[in-house]
Image (tube, helix red, strand yellow):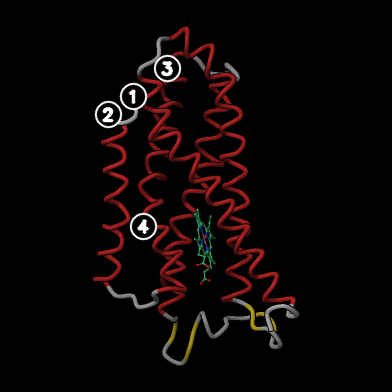
Amino acid sequence: MALTDFFSNFNLFARWLHVFAGILWIGHLYFFNFVNLPLQASLDDATKKAVNPKLMPRALWWFRWGAMITFLSGLLLFTMGYMYTPGMGFGPSALFSDSSGMTQRAIWILMGMALATLMWFNVWFIIWPAQKKLLSGQAAGEEAAALRSRAALASRINTYSSGPMLYGMLAASHYTAINAVTLLVFVLLGLAPIFHAYKSSLKVGQSV
Ligand code: HEM
């Protein structure tokens, strides 16, 4: 029925938009943490003053709007899949709960959504306000240093969260079973590449 059924077509479009915007957001997050962080540490102040006011506003624009579209399309997907049943209307669907309570699929997606929503909050209410003040020269001295470390911490939390968060997104519809062991294993499998990427970002790609 996929070609004529509006709900399925719209669902696929929303899913595509969600993953597209997610790539835009998390791609910039990884650029900031694995490329720009070690780069900035190697630049002198004059170069930073010349480069950053041109680079950062552009990169932060794609970053924060990618986060917003990912978040909104994610809420739309959640509503369509877990809080709506075609022909029956709104309310918890069979994907959300069954006779034995909340489904394992719902637990996975709620875990992913909780992490991703924290990440979205960090982007819009911590990282972006801090960067806006820093880039527009509204903060100096101690205030600037405090804003910088607050934004850096939020960015690091987001980078670590992104690994386990993505398992939550994917496991919901492609794996489903959840218990303490599967959760722990996939959280660790999500964190390990991030640790490794941070470590190797100090060494890799400095020359061709
Ligand atoms: C910001 C808050 C987010 C919310 C509320 C959210 C919500 C959702 C929902 C409800 C689904 C559908 C799950 C299902 O069909 O069972 C989903 C799938 C998915 N999400 Fe998110 N998400 C968020 C962030 C992200 C981010 C940052 C990424 C990173 C790329 C991402 C990547 C994905 C992927 C790859 C899928 C699976 C698509 C599929 O297998 O069909 N999401 N998300």
Between the residue at mark 4 and the residue at mark 3, the CA separation in whole angstroms equals 34 Å
Q: Position of residue 154 (x, y in %)?
A: 42, 39
Residue at the spot of label 3: 142
Q: Nearer the viewer, residue 10 or 180?
A: 10
Residue at the spot of label 1: 206
Q: Which of marks 2 and 4 is nearer the N terminus?
A: 4
Between the residue at mark 4 and the residue at mark 1, the CA separation in whole angstroms equals 29 Å
Q: Nearer the viewer, residue 28 or 115?
A: 28
Quadrant location of the C terminus in the rendered image: top left
Seen at 46% across and 68% down, the residue is 109
Seen at 60% across and 27% down, the residue is 57
Seen at 55% across and 34% down, the residue is 128
Q: Where is residue 42 in the image (x, y as percent from the top left)?
A: 35, 17
Query: In the picture provided, is 71 more to the left or to the right than 144?
Result: right
Residue at the spot of label 4: 164
In the image, residue 16 sits, relative to residue 125, either above or below, namely: below
Q: Earlier in the sequence, mark 4 or mark 3?
A: 3
In front: mark 4 or mark 3?
Answer: 4
Q: Earlier in the sequence, mark 4 or mark 1?
A: 4
Q: Give the amino acid type for the residue marked by disc 4 in the picture.
A: Pro
Q: Label 2, secondary structure: give it.
A: loop
Crowd class of label 2 (few under 14; some 14 to 19; many from 20; radius 10 Å): few
